[in-house]
Image: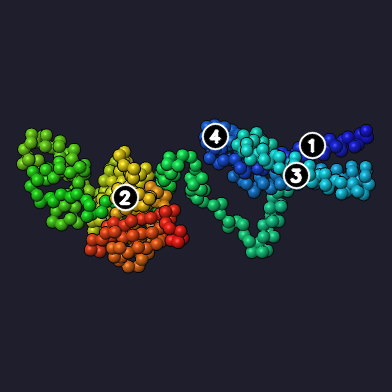
Amino acid sequence: MDIGFLISVISIVVLLLASAFFSGSETALTAASRAVMASREKEGNARAAAVNRVRAKKDRMIGALLLGNNFVNILASAIATSVLIRVFGDAGVVYATIVMTMVVLIFSEVLPKTYALHHAESLSLRVVPMVRVAILVFAPITEAVAWIVRMILKMFGIDISKVGAGSHLELLRGVIEMHSGPEEETQAQRAMLRSILDLAKVDVSDIMTHRRNVVMIDGSLSMKKIVDSVLETSHTRLPLWKDNQDDIIGIIHVKHVLRELHAAKGVFSKIQLEKILMEPRFVPDTTNLYDQLQAFRENQEHFAIVVDEYGTFMGVVTLEDILEEIVGEIDDEHDISVAGVRKMPGNVFVVDGAVTIRDLNREFEWGLPDEEYSTLAGLVIYEAQMLPQVGQSFSFHGFRFDIIKRQRNQITKIRVTPPAHLPADEQG
C-alpha cells in the first residue's frame, strides 16, 4: 500500500474526529443548563466556572467552533477528493462528494450532536479546556469575521449591538411552565413560583382586606368596651379610630391588651390607652407587594394601613396576606382553598363577585386577564360594559358567566363554567 495513500486516510480520520469534537462541543456548550453550571460554579467547580466564562462571550465561542469545524471538514473533503481522483480519475470527485457527505453527516455532525444533547453538562465540562485553547488560537480570525459580518449587516440597516440578550425573568417563567410532575402538586408549585416573580407587579390594593370588611374599634368607647371588643374578635391587630374611620390613631395588639389587663389586675379604669396603642404605618395603595414585603422585614412589622392618594382609608394589608399571595390560602379541610368559591357537580363553580381573578387563576390555572380589574365581578362588568341583571349570561375568554345574585349595584354570586365543560357551540 502506498505510504502517501495511508497518510491521507489517517489524516482524513483525524480531521473527522476533530470535526466531531467541534460539533459536539458547540451543542454541549449551548445546551448545557445555565442553572446547573451556575450551581456547580458556586460549589467550587473550576471547569463549570470556565464554561460560564466561555459562554459569557457566546459570539467568540460560536465563531471559533464554526471556524474550526468548517476548516477541518473542507480540508478532509479536499484530501479525500485528491485520493479518490488518483484511484478513480475524474469520477473520484463524485465519489468523494457522496462518501464525504455521508461520513461527515453521520460521524461528524449527527452522532456527536445527538450525544452532546443528551450529555450536555458532563460533556461541556470535559471539552471546555480545549475549547478555550481553540478560542485563543482562532481569536484574530473570528474577530475579523465578526467585524466583516457587522459591517455587512449595517449596510442593510441591521445593528446587532442593539439586540438584547433577552429577559432572564422571561426565561425563568418559561422554565416554570415547563415544570412537570404529578398534576396537583405541580400546579401548586408552578403557582407559587409564578407568584414570587409577580410580587413586583401586584399592588397591595389587589390583596388588602377592604375597609368594609376590616374590624375596627371606636376610640371614643369606654376602656371596658374597647377591651371587650378586642377579646371578642379573632384578629390579633385592630385599627383604632377617632371622630371618623379615616382618622386612625393607632393599632391595638391583643397581646398588649392582655398584658396591661393583667398588670391592672382586671381593673379597666387603670388601663391607659396610650400603653396599648402601636403607631399605625400608612402605605399607598399603589405600593407593590415586593416593596411592602421588604418594608415589613425592615421595620419588623406585620400590619399596615392602606390609603389612597388623598389619604382616605382603603383597607389593611398584613404580612400573612403577602405570604398567602405566594403560597396560597392555607386550608386543611376544604377541597377549594379559595374563600368564596364553591364547586358544583359537572365542574361548574359558584363564585362570590368579590373573589379576585388572581386567586382563581392561581387555584385553577384559568388564565383570566386582570389588568383592568381585580375581582370576578369587575371582569364581568368590564367585559359586558353594563351592570348585569340576575339571570343574564355572558361568554368571555372561553368561559360562561351566569349572574346568580345581585345586591343593589354589586354582583355577589356568579356561576362560572370553564371552557372544557361548555357545550360545543359555546366553546371559543
Q: What mark, if any, has residue 14 been given in the picture?
A: 1
| Residue pictured at 28% horizontal, 46% vertical | 318
Residue 307: x and y in percent read 26, 56
Mark 4 vs mark 1: in front: 1
Task: Give the total number of marks visible in the rendering.
Answer: 4
Q: Secondary structure at mark 1?
A: helix
Residue topped by disc 4: 40
Of pointers 4 and 1, the one earlier in the residue sequence: 1
| SS type, badge 4 | helix
Seen at 31% across and 46% down, the residue is 321
Instruction: Name the residue located 7 percent from the left edge and 40 percent from the top edge.
Output: 268
Mark 2 neighbour class, 10 Å CA radius: few under 14, some 14 to 19, many 20 or more: some
Mark yes or no: residue 282 visible: no
Disc 2: which residue: 341
Image coordinates of residue 279 in percent, x first then y, are: 21, 47
Q: Are marks 4 and 3 in contact (CB under 8 Å)?
A: no
Q: Is 377 placed above or below 192 here?
A: below
Q: Work out whether mark 2 precedes mark 3 in sequence or the reverse, and give the earlier one.
A: 3
Mark 4 or mark 2, whichever is nearer to me = 2
Amino acid found under the numbered disc labelled 4: Arg
Residue 157 position in % (x across, y down): 64, 64
Looking at marks 4 and 2 on the same chain, the residue that comes earlier in the sequence is marked by 4
Distance in Å between CA atoms under marks 1 and 3: 16 Å
Q: Nearer the viewer, residue 236 or 301?
A: 236
Marks 4 and 1 sit apart, C-alpha to C-alpha, by 33 Å
Circle 3 sits in a helix, a strand or a loop, which is it? helix
Q: Are marks 2 and 3 in contact (CB under 8 Å)?
A: no
From the image, tell me which residue sits under label 3: 105
